[in-house]
Amino acid sequence: MQPTLHARLTEYLLADYGFKVKSAWLQKGRCPECGKEELFTSAEHPWVLRCGRLNHCAWEGDVKELYPNLFNTWSEQFPVVEHNPKAAADAYLQYARGFDLKRIQGWYTQEHYCDSKLKIGSATIRFTVGDTFWERLIDQPERFSKKANFKPGGRYAGLWWQPPTLNLSTVKELWLVEGIFDAIALDHHGIAAVALLSCTNYPQQALSTLLTQCQGNQPRLIWALDSDQAGQKGILKGVRQARKAGWACEAAQIPQNTQNKLDWNDCHQRERLTETDIKEYRYHGALLLAESPIERARLLYQKNGVSEFILDYQKQLYSFSLNRAKLDRMLEHKGKGEEGEAVIFQAASKLTVIANCIPKVLYYQADNNADKSWYCFEISQPNGCTVQNTFTGAQIATASEFKKRLLSVAPLAFYSGTTRQLNHYLQEQTRQLAWVKTLDFIGYSREYGCYIFDTVAVKNGRVIELSQHGCFELGTLRIKSINREEIFTISRDKQTAHLWLDKLWQCFGGKGLVVLAFWFGALFAEQIRAHTKSFPYLEIIGEPGAGKSTLLEFLWKLLGRANYEGINPAGSSLSALTRNFARISNLPVVLLEGDHRDPHNSFALDALKMVYNGRCVRAVSVTNNGNETKEPAFRGALVISQNAPVDAGEAIQERLISLRFDRSQHSEHTRRSAKALETIPLENISGFILQAITQETVVLNTLYERIPIYEAQLHTHTEIQLLARISKNHALIYALIDALAVVLPLSHEQKKAAQTAILCAAENRQRFLNKEDAVVEEFWDLFEYLERESTTPRLNHASDPAYIAINFNDVARVAKEQGQLVPELSRFSEIGKLKARLRTSQRYQFIAVKAVRSAIRADRTSNSALPLTIKCWVFKRNNNLD
């Protein structure tokens, strides 16, 4: 291994797995699968990490998959130099593939591939095949839609690639593999191999040429394509065709499991191409080529010596049992011989179909929050139908329950075996069963540091596609979301912002960019809350027709969700709202016309104060036999869209970024731009979400650097210096504009307009909070009117002119006498609300509720029936308290 690469890799391994360096080995590392300190690898050549618990875990990890950043920028690490024009290719083949460069010199060249659509390129390793070539991309191939490329217009059908030093006229066995690197790997172990380049390529022309070269001494063909479904189908088809043409054929297959997908190059790097290994691979190839279920059973019996087992053959499940005593008697009586033994074996055996399909266990998954778990099965049927679905523990515990569930998930899939046979079959499958972590929400997982959506995941800036088994494989982590309610159709194509950014700017100006920045920030809400301990709410208000719905529906399309605006809390139950808040992460939750004062509606925005800090909206019970409850955290960002401003308490008002839209700037030009936004196809813009979250590191670094700068600037602003929370919230939006410019090409004019809109929003928010509550304002107007209408105090019981002491019964009585009926004073339920608002009074500052010696009654000593001390609400006329 190259010294610099070896040093960096060793540093990562010691830090991540806690290895102890012992002579030539790294030992006692923490296994990511079982958690035991049994992980080991070679100190000099740490290509593969292995768990020493072979019977209980046996986990393996390829460092190229665990640390892809070390193995995907070969041109950068090994630039071309004058004396070696293929430096990157050499390094890739030696360090990433484990090949001896002396053995393969002259077999390849280093070239360059450029994707004209994506406008990006990569160095390649190129091999010639007939009149065409095959080349492997080696610089961050995940950026492209493919890892390899053929010469445009070239054809390789009917041909194969062979090592230039291989003399086919002298070989006794010729291995046919899919990839060129597989053929090179086998060549390193003295095995003659050629690459077909595709599992569907039957090498008719190459075999005809070989037949001429070998002059009657035809080699045996060993079909060793990949061990996946396509490769096995290619082997069976190729063997049939080759045998028909007179070729002797066998097969070789690498046993696979759900944890590691191995090819011949992988086996070469894992030192698994010994004579014993090859014998094992040929045995599995023989199982694949077995022409009947009894022949397959015979191979299994010869290998394991077990007289009773379950086997699969051509997408059906069989129960096999052997009468050994009968077999021994018949062999002794009739003698031995390969053909005779096969007939005798069949006569002494019993073979029964117990399922007309193959139910294969893929992995185990659990939802720890709900105390539920499932086993994910893949059901394959002879007609080619393949489905994946889950079974509970109860559904696989007995044959009757398994039969019912099987019929419900796959069309006419029957199981007719016993519970004992089912248990035996499943136990064999689950010896090294993978465990898939589950999320009950969609979006970002703070625990695992990755984004999980329906069909795509992102971790550390890398996009991962959904595996064929329905989960995401992120190194050693296998994870999926079990939330099926939020559906996002996300484009993988690189997005071009000019398709829509200018249209958005023309329609909504700086305010529209501020909303876009908040929407963009929602994609990082969890990380931002972890850093700043909060994330503000966005209030979008304006008259009907101002464009609020057009804007929100377009922003949802940027995230891959079509024909959606938000939810109406007035039309949703409290439990439904709780689920809406809990089932997303790093995504917005939009409440439409959410601030309703309908007394029959239990929802109120004041109840959402805790989501500012990412806390629970509402505790819910756990469905089990205990008394447990759970408090799901709010992991998203709250948006409120309605015509009128939010009517909520000061705590909510301080947390808002408020933007008002109107129709004053509407014109024919803006209407055309709005129409263009509405008609942009979702697939053309939904890649924005990937474009944003793959830049997570740069975005967050920008935010963390700029937030304190903007907060300090806003906090010293004369209009808003009173409330630190306003400075903090709006500073975040300022910083989000800068971070958004990392992803989108914002012009100087656009950034300036957005910053102006943010400053206006902050100033307006402070003015709004400085304004007296309307009900409180009305009450004090009434109080002052009633006091002015009399030459002596009617309502103020305070003897000190700096204070006001009022009794609400007095206020209600005097108001009635003066014909000034106030609803808040005439209904008991409304008095409570009035009192709550008076506590925040700004005209006269609330001091306390206490007994006061009444200045009014002290002056009226003739009425001795009235007590001199009365319970009053006390306020101070001057707000500048000591």
Image: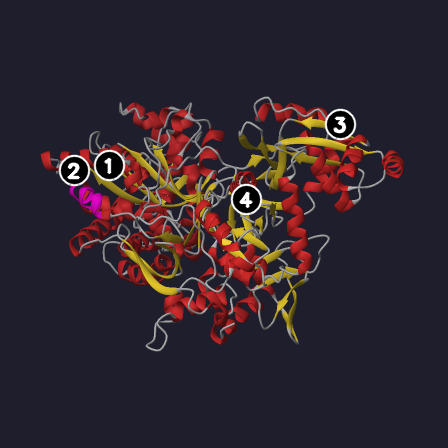
Residue tagged by mark 1?
680
Tell me the number on the disc at residue 228. 4
- Sequence-first disc among 4 and 1: 4
Q: Please indicate whether residue 426 sits to the left or right of residue 436 in the image.
A: right
Mark 2 or 3, closer to the camera: 3
Q: Nearest to the eye among marks 4 and 2: give it.
A: 4
Magenta part, dominant SS:
helix
Q: Give the magenta-colored segment's residue range.
A: 498-506
Which residue corresponds to mark 3?
418
Among numbered discs 2 and 3, the one appearing first in the sequence:
3
Q: CA distance from mark 4 to mark 2?
A: 50 Å
Q: Is residue 855 above or below residue 824?
A: below
Q: Are marks 4 and 1 in contact (CB under 8 Å)?
A: no
Question: Viewed as shown, does residue 664 lie left or right of 458?
Answer: left
Return the residue at label 2.
673
Examine the rendering and report whether any part of residue 556 can be seen: yes
The answer to the question of whether label 3 and label 1 lie on touching residues, with beta carbons closer than 8 A, is: no
The Cα–Cα distance between marks 2 and 1, rounded to whole angstroms, is 11 Å
**Residue pictured at 56% horizontal, 23% vertical:** 411
In the displayed structure image, the side of residue 807 where residue 328 appears, left or right: right
Does the rendering let one see residue 793? Answer: no
Check disc 2 and report its element: helix, strand or loop.
helix
What kind of residue is marked 4?
Answer: Asp
Tell me residue 637's x, y (percent).
39, 44
Establish if 331 lies above or below 96.
above
Q: Depth check: 466 or 872 in front?
A: 466
Confirm whether the magenta stretch covers residue 411: no
